[in-house]
Image (cartoon, rainbow, N blue to C red):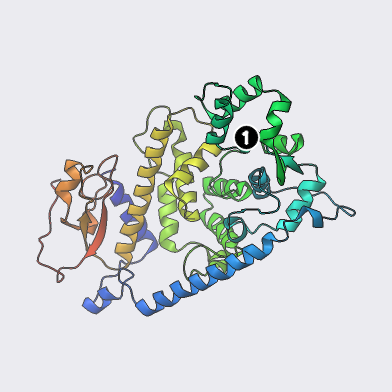
Amino acid sequence: MKHIFLNLLNIFKKLNNKIPTPQNKQDAQNTNYSLKNVSEMEKLTYEAQERSQHYYSLHKDKLKRLDPKKVDLSNFKERHLTSTELYFLKYLDGVNVNDPNIAGYWTHEYNINYADVLKQYLGQGLLVVSDEKDLHNFKVAELKQILSEKGLPKTGRKEELINRIHDNFTPDELTKYIKSNEQYYKLTAKGKEMVKNLRPSATKNIELEDKCYSLILDGKFNEAYMEIAKYESQKPIPRGLGVDWGNISKNGLSKNELINCIDHMNLEQDLPLSLKKYQKHINACVILGIMLGISYDKILKLFLRICDVECDKQLIYEAIVMNCIYYIGKRDIYSYLENGVEKYKFITSLDENTCEKCAKLDGKIFDVRKAKFGVNYPPICKTCRCTTVPYYDDFDDCDEVEIPK
C-alpha cells in the first residue's frame, strides 16, 4: 500500500494535463472544503423538512388505499412482482388490517403503490385476511408468556419457542392466543414459498443491485452510477440535499470519481486466506455501496447476498470497512490535487480505543504528494478511524513532518 499513491498520481497526471495550484489565499478559500453559503444550506434544510412533512402526509393518505374491502378482482391480470414488492409482501405478514402501522420508507424510499400491490397479492393467492395471528408474528416475550402457563422452558431462539408451543398445546388450546377480534394480513402457503428464499438486501431492490454490480465488474462504472441516479431521481424523496439526480443520470461520474473506481478495482488487501479469491467482489461491492450511499452494514449485506462465502462475518465486515477507507482516502487525495491543496493535517479520534501509531500522527502536517497509506495517511491500523483535512501554511505555525523513506 505504500506505493499506491504513486500509481494514483500517475493516473491523475495522465488524465489531467496539469495539477492546479491555488494562486492566493482567496483561491484556497473558494475550494469545496469550506461552506460557501450558510444561508443556502439553511434554505436547503428547510426545504427538505417541508418536503419530508409533505410526504409523510402523502404516506398517510396512500395507506388509506391499503384496504382489502376495496380490491376488485373481477378483471384481475397477474403480473411479475419485483423484489421490492416481494419484500413488502413479507413485511405485510401479521400487519393489522384496520390499523396498518406501515413504515414511511415504503412510500418515500420504495414508492410502493399500495392499491396495486395488494390487488396482486390477493389475486395471486399470496395473502389473505384472517382473524388468527401467526405465532411467528408474536414477540418473544409473548411466546414466553404462553409457555409459562404450562410451566414449560422459556429458553432458546424464537423458532424453538414456537416449536415448543406447537408440541405442547392443542389447536383448541392455542385458539385463545391466536384468535382475535382484529383482522390481520396473513401469508398463504404460496406466499410463504414466494418469499422463502429472500435474503437480506441492502436496498430491497435486487434487480438494481445485481445490474449495477455486474456493470461495475465489467468496468462500466459510469453506466452503473447513471442507473443508480435514475433510480434516485424517481424516488419521492431522493437521497441528498440539492442533488440533481436527473442531471447525474445523464452525465454520470466526475472524472476524479471515475479514476478512483478504475484504480480501486485493482486494490489488493491483506485478506484472510478464505477471502482472498473474493477481493474483486469486495472491491465491486464497496464501489457499489458508496454509489448507493449505504452503510458498512448494508455493504456487508450486499456482499453476503451476492457471494455465498463461508467465512466469519466479522472478518468480512472488517475487510469492507478497510476497503471503504482506502476508497474514500484516494478520493480525498484526488480532491486535494484537483483543488491545489499541497498539504494535509492528520486528525485522530483520541480515546481509549486509539492505537499508538494513530495517536502519534494526530495533528501532524504532511505533503499531499508524499502521502502513503498505512504510513502517514489513513488507514493506519485495522480499526483506523482517522481522517485528514486540508492544511495551508498561513493557517497556523505548525511545522511539516517528513516521513523517513
Does residue 118 appear to the left or right of 237 in the view shown?
right
Task: Locate residue 254, reporting x and y percent.
Answer: 45, 64
Is residue 121 among the parts visible in the rendering? yes
Task: Locate residue 262, reporting x and y percent.
Answer: 44, 51
Number of on-image labels: 1
Foreground pick, 154 / 289:
154
Task: Locate residue 308, reporting x and y percent.
Answer: 54, 32
Is residue 247 among the parts visible in the rendering? no
Q: Residue at x 16, y 70 (%)?
A: 395
Find disc 1 in the rendering and name its residue.
Answer: 136
- In the rendered image, the quadrant that contains the N terminus is top left
Q: Residue at x 23, y 57 (%)?
A: 369
Q: Quadrant of residue 140?
A: top right
Does residue 331 appear to the left or right of 350 in the view shown?
right
Q: Residue at x 46, y 35 (%)?
A: 278
| Other-residue count near label 1 (Cα within 10 Å), few / some / many at <14 / 14–19 / ≥20 | some
Task: Locate residue 97, reporting x and y percent.
Answer: 70, 50
Foreground pick, 248 / 90:
90
Q: Quadrant of residue 142?
A: top right
Does residue 187 appear to the left or right of 396 in the view shown?
right
